[in-house]
Amino acid sequence: MVVASSDGTVARIDAQSGHEAWRVRIKGGISAATGSDGTFTAVVNRHNQLVSLGPQGQLLWLYQLPTSVITAPLVTGGTVVVQGADQHLWAFNAANGQKLWSTESRAPALLLHQASGLAVQGDSLLVGTAQGRIESVAIATGAQRWAVTLARPRGITEVERVVSITGAPAIGGSMACARAYQSAIGCADLDTGRLLWVDKADGDTGVSQNGSLLVATQGDGVVQAYVAADGGQRWSNSQLKYRDLSAPLLLGMTVAVGDYQGYITFLSAKDGSIIGRVSTDGSAIESPMVAAGKTLVAVTRSGGVYGFVPE
């Protein structure tokens, strides 16, 4: 896996052993997390330049984007896709920088300065947008296949009307699920975009699901599990309230959540009971945790990278 820090350091790490394969420094620091397909790696620096790195971390090319970027680029099959803060999408050949396509999208008056996310399913790219939608587009051409709305702007002020998708759409089974900022959680059919269900939910972190169970952390720190197919509530745990929880990660029969003190708490996916807890370096778990095989990888605000194997 590849990790990066705001000062421009990018490193490739073996997720099983923690061994560092290479490390480079990107001029201008980094504005968003990294994306990698195992061969190519992409980041965006604070000068809004998209930077592509090769298998050994070598610089391949740079492209000056016309907008800032806060969402990590996505790299898949030698293609780099980047989403601008203004909701534009661009796709490039990861090896030589050739622009493959671009799309435009009308941005709302007020944009949430928080990463949404991109996900891949087959030859489709799933995009979380600032309009409260999940969109499916063809990776090869950028053509839209479907779009589904989880939340619509309501309220008087621009702040009240923010409905941005937060976190990458979570793919599991035949569904794509996501959260709209402080308003809703819902799932749609992957093939058609048909909305399966949507439920009110107050929170601003992404969700995790495996096709049967969907887990989310609410704004007050309650960990909530839903039946992924219909949104029925499976269980909830309020023992971690007000600990500024990270997005959850569903890994096998375990749910992991990080908090502002760097603790990672493990809950049973069956009933939500706490089954374990580990500490890191005392700083917050801010970035979404990821699974690499059976290993859970967490990155702290202070730059620590930790790997755990839940039992």
Image (spheres, grey):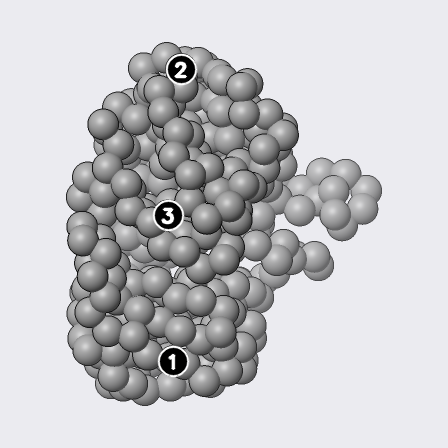
In the image, residue 128 lies at what x, y percent?
46, 50
Residue at image x 59%, y 62%?
106
In the image, residue 304 lies at what x, y percent?
41, 56
Residue at image x 39%, y 66%?
4
Quadrant, the C terminus:
top left
In the image, residue 192 lies at what x, y percent?
32, 39
Q: Amino acid at mark 3?
A: Ala
Decide: is 295 above or below 120: above
Secondary element at image label 3: strand
Taking the image as shown, residue 27 lies to the left or right of residue 21, namely right
| Mark 1 neighbour density, 10 Å: few (under 14) some (14–19) many (20 or more) | some
- Specify the quadrant of the image occupied by residue 19: bottom left
Residue at image x 35%, y 71%?
10
Decide: is 104 above or below 177: below
Residue at image x 39%, y 29%?
277
Q: Give the mark nearer the N terminus: 2 vs 1.
A: 1
Q: Amino acid at mark 1?
A: Arg
Question: Mark 3 to mark 1: distance in Å?
Answer: 21 Å
Q: Which residue is mark 2?
A: 273
Q: Amino acid at mark 2?
A: Ser
- Specify the quadrant of the image occupied by residue 110: bottom right
Q: Which residue is mark 3?
A: 298
Residue 25: numbered disc: 1
Q: How many marks?
A: 3
141 or 178: nearer the viewer: 178
Secondary element at image label 2: loop
